[in-house]
């Protein structure tokens, strides 16, 4: 504020010039393009883009490595709880 003063702008200050390329948040879901560009790319709605992001995230998921003994222990636990009346789950 001290560098710019009343009626000035921040685009000419060194602080802004040092940071403007990396300081802005790039939205994950919203599309800030103009109508023509948006329409030419298929006119995807926010719901469409959210579904694409979800699908890509699920497809790229790799479960973390897990010790076989630990996995068997968890499977036994789930089987016991299911036999005791818990909800049956599919894996």
Image (cartoon, grey):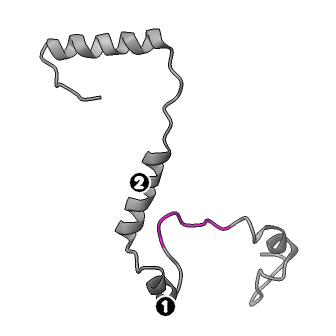
Q: Name the quadrant of the N terminus.
A: bottom right
Q: Earlier in the sequence, mark 1 or mark 2?
A: 1
| Residue 67 horizontal/vertical position (percent) | 51, 14
* Residue at x 38%, y 11% (from the top left corner): 72
Residue 40 is left or right of residue 24, and the answer is left
Q: Please, what secondary structure does the residue beneath circle 2 have?
A: helix
* Residue at x 42%, y 66% (from the top left corner): 49
Is 24 drawn above or below residue 13 in the view shown? above
Q: Please, what secondary structure does the residue beneath circle 1 have?
A: helix
Residue 43 is left or right of residue 5, and the answer is left
| Residue 8 horizontal/vertical position (percent) | 77, 88
Q: Which residues are magenta?
A: 24-30
- For mark 1, what is the residue? 36
Badge 1 local density, few (<14 within 10 Å), some, or many (20+)? Answer: few
Is 33 drawn above or below residue 75 in the view shown? below
Residue 48 is left or right of residue 82, and the answer is right
**In front of the other: 26 or 19:** 26
Is 3 magenta? The answer is no
Is 20 drawn above or below residue 58 in the view shown? below
Q: Name the quadrant of the C terminus.
A: top left
Name the magenta segment's main secondary structure.
loop
Residue 23 is left or right of residue 58, and the answer is right
| Residue 18 horizontal/vertical position (percent) | 84, 69
* Residue at x 53%, y 82% (from the top left corner): 33
């Amino acid at each position: 504020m001290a560098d710019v003063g009343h009626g000035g702008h921040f685009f000419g200050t060194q602080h802004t010039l040092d940071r403007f390329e990396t300081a802005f948040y790039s939205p994950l879901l919203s599309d800030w393009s103009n109508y023509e560009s948006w329409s030419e790319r298929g006119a995807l709605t926010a719901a469409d883009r959210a579904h694409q992001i979800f699908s890509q995230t699920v497809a790229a998921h790799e479960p973390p490595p897990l010790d076989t003994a630990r996995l068997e222990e968890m499977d036994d636990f789930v089987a016991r709880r299911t036999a005791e009346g818990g909800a049956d789950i599919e894996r």
